[in-house]
Image: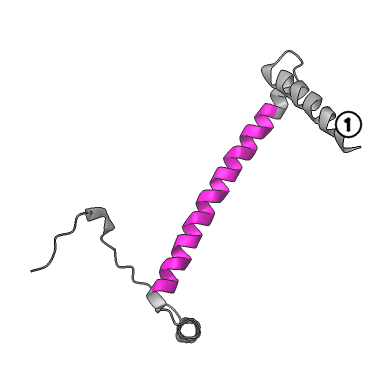
Amino acid sequence: MAMPRTNPSSKAETLTFRIEPPLKAAFARIAAQENRPVGELLRELVHERVERKRRRAYEAKAHRQSMEAAAAALEASSDEAAVMRELDGALAEFRDEWK
């Protein structure tokens, strides 16, 4: 009797795509050299691509936010400008210690 799945989201999906025979053969050779199944390498590639896309989106958002904060810091009475003055003071202390 088979054990029931405890996590239905862990069920894998099947992805079918076309690939040129020479590319498939080259990829299969790489998998054989690494003693890993082709499917495992493909899953790794897909995971890396998705993670890279997620990371780039995160970095773009962080860049936008930092540019907005930098623009706000140009206003001398803004909270951002006050934080920058505090950071400059703290860094000046370290600069003096490093001399």
Residue 57 at what x, y percent from top left?
54, 46
The quarter of the image holding the N terminus is bottom left
Residue 71 at what x, y percent from top left?
71, 26
Q: Is residue 13 left or right of residue 88?
A: left
Element under disc 1: helix
The quarter of the image holding the C terminus is top right
Residue at image position (29%, 63%) is: 12
Looking at numbered disc 1 in the image, what kind of residue is underneath it? Asp
Residue at image position (84%, 28%) is: 92
Q: Is residue 31 left or right of residue 81?
A: left
Magenta stretch prevailing secondary structure: helix
Residue lying farthest to the top in this orientation = 77
- Depicted 96 relative to depicted 17: above or below: above
Q: Which residues are magenta?
A: 40-69
Note whether residue 18 is visible: no
The residue carrying mark 1 is 96
Residue at image position (75%, 26%) is: 87
**Which color scheme does this rendered protein use?**
one colour
User: Dividing the picture into quarters, in which one does residue 38 lie?
Assistant: bottom left
Q: Closest to the observer: 74 or 98?
A: 98
